[in-house]
Image: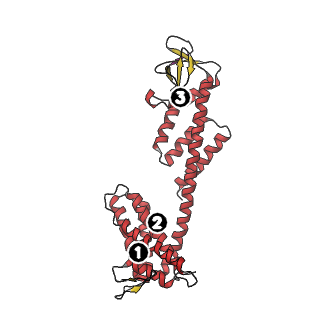
Amino acid sequence: MTSRFEEALRLAEEILTDIEEGGDVEKSLRKYYRLNKLVNNDKECQWTNNELLGYQNDDNVPSYRIRVFSQGVAIFGQTGERVFIKNNCSTLKDMAASDIPRSYRYVSSNEYTNILGKNTVPVYPSVHRDILATINNRIYNKTTDILFELKFEKMESDIFDETRSFVNHELNEICPKALQKLAETYDSLINSDSPLKLQQIAFACRTILDDFADAVYPPKEEKVVGFDDKVHPVKDNHHINRIVQYVYENAESDSTKDFMKANFEYLNNFLRNIYEQTNIGTHDEREKEHANRCVIYTYLVLGDVIRLSKSSTK
């Protein structure tokens, strides 16, 4: 995994520990900002900035910072004078620690005074403590979600890395040409954001499978009977048929017919899906996702092909 990923994982764990141990909410906000920068969550970065620096206008103030008053008494869910508490987190902490209520104006509530006057209402320290508690709870809940996503991503990455290592090792024996292309394609995927390059990566996955088919099951003019008891062509341009036929003819003998048939149907569909992916137009808005999927699918399907056949060098 990348150092960026590991840093995000460590930081998420640290934030949760800090909150559970009663740590400072402002400190947690700063760490939470760094975490969301690492995971590219701009929306949460903006929310964190507002909490650290204060809200600049009423439109951005979240509901937990809004209080409704009628004749100087707070009422909730009813019509009255609305007070928008826009102070930054540091100021809220000072207010929460004080025994003195703050007087807020109905409008531009960032202006407050210790003197009650026209169009002002008292806001007690408990209100500021409630706001801080809500901020803390949000950080904790959102960080928990991020942590689970990171751990799931790590699990997926570990599984993929294991498959990639297995396929690389086996391809070195079966089809070195395909291994070289696959390694180059994987490196290009990691280092490229160019739409043209990403489309080349997707197309490369198809040529890798073509090279693999040529290596394990060279073209034949005559048709062959496949796993489904039907006759299939296995000429030069029938790469999918040839790969599936290769696995069928080299499958472990102790596997049951029904089980192997299900595997071959899956393998056949998987291969055709990859070929369809490599034909997506060059102006797809999700170029990176498309290229990622092609490379991952290529590794997965090659891993299945090798494991289902006798070609694995155990």
The residue that disc 1 covers is 209
User: Where in the figure is residue 70, as x and y percent of width and height?
Assistant: 53, 17
Q: Earlier in the sequence, mark 2 or mark 3?
A: 3
The residue that disc 3 covers is 65
The residue that disc 2 covers is 296
Look at the numbered disc 1 and give the secondary structure of its residue: helix
Vertical position of residue 95 compared to residue 287: above or below: above
Q: Contact, CB < 8 Å: mark 2 with mark 3? A: no
Residue type for callout 3: Arg
Residue type for callout 1: Leu
Whether residue 279 can be seen here: yes
**Position of the N terminus by quadrant:** bottom right
Q: Which residues are magenta?
A: 111-118
Residue drawn at x 56%, y 58% as measured from the top left:
154
Residue type for callout 2: Ile
Residue closer to the observer: 238 or 120: 238
* Label 2, residues with CA under 10 Å away: few <14, some 14-19, many ≥20: some
Residue closer to the observer: 202 or 119: 119
User: Where in the figure is residue 209, as x and y percent of width and height?
Assistant: 41, 75
- Asked if residue 116 is among those painted magenta in the image, a careful observer would answer yes
Look at the numbered disc 2 and give the secondary structure of its residue: helix
Residue pushed farthest top? 117
Residue drawn at x 38%, y 76% as measured from the top left:
210
**Position of the C terminus by quadrant:** bottom right
Residue pushed farthest bottom? 222
